[in-house]
């Protein structure tokens, strides 16, 4: 039995496009074909999606395997989702569930019903955090995502996150105008609308040479959903022991 699909969802940094599938009732083997576009800033591995994928049927949550393959930054890779099914399994009523029920999920019904997922929102945020006389970080891009972050400031990967949380990801350019001494920006945190603070994950660590520039580094902050309100970004430079901040509003 073969079936075709044309569903696209966003989950944990991937734009997932499910295109087709087959089910062999003799071997009880389900195969679903999909492509995975990597929207993070680090290379990923498609098979890791299988750690958080369940095939839902008849009240059962069954882990599906995803074939292996590297997915470079910005690239799209094809992969196959496989499941050895239980007795009496049918494709009708089966749903691919990326993420757990208490997390932001992407759901793809295999009967052709519309797929659903939460998606990122680009932010209009900019400003320069000045830390003392020489060090500065100019925010030039931001996004609100239904995912968590890990990795390094220049190589951020995304992962599952609880439904009551989202992440604010900010990118920018770190500069140091000092003629002789290096600068080291070692802290970044957000004051969120409920009065609590969120530290950047991955941790801030920008080593900027004298008269140097470091581009395309990021910070990611886990905040309460839906992520709207007024935020204050504060950063610290180690050598000068100076801090600076900017504020921005998410509608």
Image: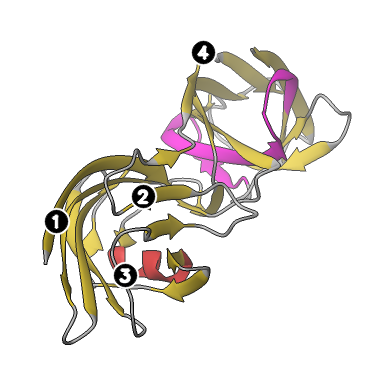
Q: Are marks 3 and 4 in contact (CB under 8 Å)?
A: no
Q: Is residue 27 above or below residue 104?
A: below
Instruction: Give residue 108's mark.
Output: 2
The range drawn in magenta is 204-233
Mark 3 highlights which residue? 47
The coloring applied to the image is secondary structure
In this view, the mark in front (3 or 4): 3
Instruction: Give residue 3's mark.
Output: 1
Q: Looking at the image, is mark 1 or mark 3 earlier in the sequence? A: 1
Q: Is residue 81 visible?
A: yes
Image quarter in which the C terminus is found:
top right
Residue 37 % position (x, y): 26, 46
- Cα distance in 3D space between marks 3 and 4: 34 Å
Q: Is residue 183 visible?
A: no
- Cα distance in 3D space between marks 3 and 2: 18 Å
Q: Looking at the image, is mark 3 or mark 4 earlier in the sequence? A: 3
In this view, the mark in front (4 or 1): 1
Mark 4 highlights which residue? 124
Q: Is residue 27 above or below residue 233?
A: below
- Cα distance in 3D space between marks 4 and 2: 31 Å
């Amino acid at each position: 039995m073969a079936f075709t699909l044309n569903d696209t969802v966003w989950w944990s940094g991937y734009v997932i496009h499910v295109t087709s599938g087959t089910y062999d009732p003799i071997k009880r083997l389900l195969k679903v074909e999909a492509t995975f576009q990597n929207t993070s800033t680090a290379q990923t591995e498609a098979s890791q999606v299988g750690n958080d994928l369940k095939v839902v049927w008849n009240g059962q949550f069954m882990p599906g395997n995803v074939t292996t393959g590297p997915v470079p930054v910005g690239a799209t890779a094809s992969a196959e989702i496989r499941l050895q099914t239980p007795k009496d399994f049918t494709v009708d009523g089966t749903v691919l569930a990326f993420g757990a029920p208490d997390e932001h999920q992407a759901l793809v019904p295999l009967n052709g019903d519309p797929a659903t997922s939460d998606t990122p929102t680009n932010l209009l945020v900019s400003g320069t955090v000045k830390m003392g006389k020489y060090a500065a970080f100019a925010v030039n891009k931001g996004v609100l995502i239904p995912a968590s972050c890990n990795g390094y400031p220049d190589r951020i990967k995304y992962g599952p996150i609880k439904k009551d949380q989202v992440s604010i990801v900010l990118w920018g350019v770190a500069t140091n105008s000092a003629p002789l001494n290096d600068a080291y920006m070692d802290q970044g945190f957000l004051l969120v609308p409920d009065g609590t603070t969120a530290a950047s994950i991955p941790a801030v660590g920008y080593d900027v040479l004298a008269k140097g520039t470091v581009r395309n580094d990021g910070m990611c902050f886990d905040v309460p959903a839906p992520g709207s309100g007024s935020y204050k970004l504060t950063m610290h430079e180690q050598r000068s022991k100076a801090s600076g901040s900017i504020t921005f509003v998410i509608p």
